Structures are given as structure tokens and as C-alpha cells.
Image (cartoon, rainbow, N blue to C red):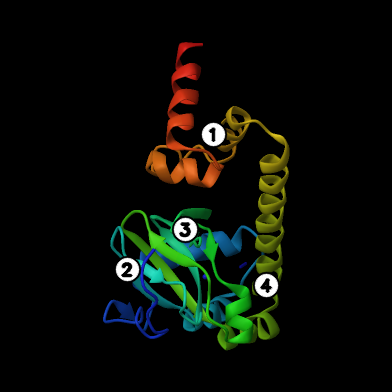
């Protein structure tokens, strides 16, 4: 699990929409399904997990975190979709990750070192997320064996996806990258603007539009 505009303080995103208990959120049900698909939990163990998270609702376009903030939380996406991106010295956005339901977002380096993050996390759609701070997460890893097992399984998925993307970026054509994205993330393609998808795939919106037109003619 690993969380352009002016930087704001690390407290700026902890506003009134942050709720102290997640038990009433459907997002928590998604988390439970996600974890139980990877390890069996007793009710007592799951109660420990539930108490460690807080719930936040985001509207489309709202930032969960901005570059320059010190990361305090990792986020599990219960509904909606977020994006993780950076802005280079020329002001261009580069999308690192899309995070739909059941995905995690976190800046592990910032969380562990307390240094400012270089990443922006923004909701593409109205979204519900569950947040957990570093000490609470480590406590769950140490105290709840099924959570540690489920977390390792999630890390493996994340690492595999990252490796596949690196290989694709280095060796695949623009059309091959698009087709691979369609196969791997079919639920995301129609949910994100074309410009964002092009940024993620490392091509211009014009190139992506041309690829889509060519494919539609086949």
C-alpha cells in the first residue's frame, strides 16, 4: 500500500467532512468484503479494524491531499474514484495511479519520514474513503493477524500492477498500452476524462483520440 495547485498545510484536508466513526458508512462494508476475501476475521478482530478507521466523503474535484502536505493517513476507497498525480517543473500533470473502489492510496515515504509529499490525491467522482494513520495501521499489523495477511496480499497486487505498468511504458506502443489498460481496468475507462487517461498512459489526448477512432473502425 503506498497517499496543480498551491501547497496547503497538512491539516487543511481534515475539515468538517471527516467523521470520527466509519461504522455507518457503506464504505466500511466494502472494506470488510475486501479484507475477508483475503483472510478470515473473527468479529472481535474486525471490531479492532473498524475502530482504527475514520470516514470521509469527498466531492468530485476535492483534494484529499496536496503536494507539500505531510501525509498523515493512508486511504482505502470505498466508493468513487480518485487519482494520484504530480506536477512537473513546467506545470504539466502526470497521473501516477487511478484508485477506484477497493484500492488504497498512500504516500509511504511521507508517512514514514514526516517529509512533505510530492503527490496530489484528488477525487475524480464523488467518493467515500476510509482513513487510517500510521501508528494505528502499524498496531493493526502487529495485533490483528488476519489484517496483516490481507495487507500483504494487497501489497502484492499493488507491486504487480506497478511492475506491469513499468514494463508496458518501456516496451509497448501507445495502442498496446491503451488496449492493456482496457483489459486490466475495464471499469475505469468510461469513468475518467480522456485527458486524464492520456496522461496516465503517457500520450497526448490527440493520440488517444486517434487510437480510439482507429479501433472503432476495425
Above or below — where is 76 with respect to 195?
A: below
Residue drawn at x 61%, y 68% as measured from the top left: 2
State left or right for residue 209 relative to residue 40: left
Label 2: few (<14), some (14–19) or many (≥20) C-alpha neighbours in 10 Å: many
Q: Which residue is mark 4?
A: 146
Label 4: few (<14), some (14–19) or many (≥20) C-alpha neighbours in 10 Å: many
Residue 14 position by quadrant = bottom left
Q: Which residue is mark 1?
A: 182
* Contact check, label 1 and label 2, Cβ < 8 Å: no
The mark closer to the camera, 1 or 2, is 1
Residue 75 point in image, percent of width and height: 49, 70
Label 3 vs 4, first from the N-terminus: 3
Instruction: Give the distance between the C-alpha atoms of the residues marked 3 and 1, in whole angstroms.
Output: 30 Å
Above or below — where is 113 with respect to 36?
A: below
Q: Which residue is mark 3?
A: 90
Q: Which residue is mark 2?
A: 57
Where disc 2 sits, the SS reads: strand
The mark closer to the camera, 2 or 3, is 3
Residue 206 point in image, percent of width and height: 43, 31
Amino acid at each position: 500500500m503506498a497517499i496543480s495547485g498551491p501547497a496547503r498545510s497538512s491539516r487543511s484536508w481534515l475539515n468538517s467532512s471527516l467523521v470520527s466513526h466509519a461504522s455507518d458508512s457503506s464504505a466500511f462494508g466494502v472494506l470488510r468484503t475486501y479484507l475477508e476475501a483475503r483472510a478470515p476475521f473473527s468479529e472481535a478482530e474486525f471490531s479492532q479494524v473498524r475502530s482504527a478507521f475514520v470516514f470521509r466523503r469527498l466531492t468530485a474535484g476535492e483534494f484529499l491531499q496536496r503536494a507539500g502536505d505531510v501525509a498523515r493517513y493512508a486511504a482505502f476507497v470505498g466508493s468513487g474514484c480518485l487519482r494520484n498525480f504530480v506536477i512537473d517543473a513546467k506545470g504539466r500533470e502526470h497521473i501516477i495511479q487511478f484508485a477506484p473502489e477497493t484500492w488504497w492510496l498512500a504516500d509511504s515515504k511521507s508517512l514514514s519520514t514526516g517529509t512533505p509529499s510530492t503527490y496530489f490525491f484528488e477525487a475524480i467522482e464523488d467518493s467515500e474513503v476510509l482513513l487510517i494513520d500510521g501508528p494505528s495501521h502499524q498496531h493493526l499489523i502487529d495485533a490483528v493477524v488476519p489484517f496483516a495477511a490481507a495487507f500483504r496480499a494487497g501489497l502484492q497486487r499493488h507491486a504487480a500492477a506497478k511492475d506491469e505498468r513499468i514494463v508496458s511504458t518501456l516496451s509497448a506502443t501507445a495502442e498496446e498500452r491503451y488496449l492493456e489498460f482496457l483489459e486490466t481496468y475495464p471499469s475505469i475507462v468510461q469513468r475518467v476524462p480522456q485527458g486524464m487517461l492520456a496522461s496516465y498512459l503517457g500520450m497526448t489526448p490527440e493520440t488517444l483520440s486517434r487510437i480510439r477512432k482507429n479501433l472503432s473502425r476495425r
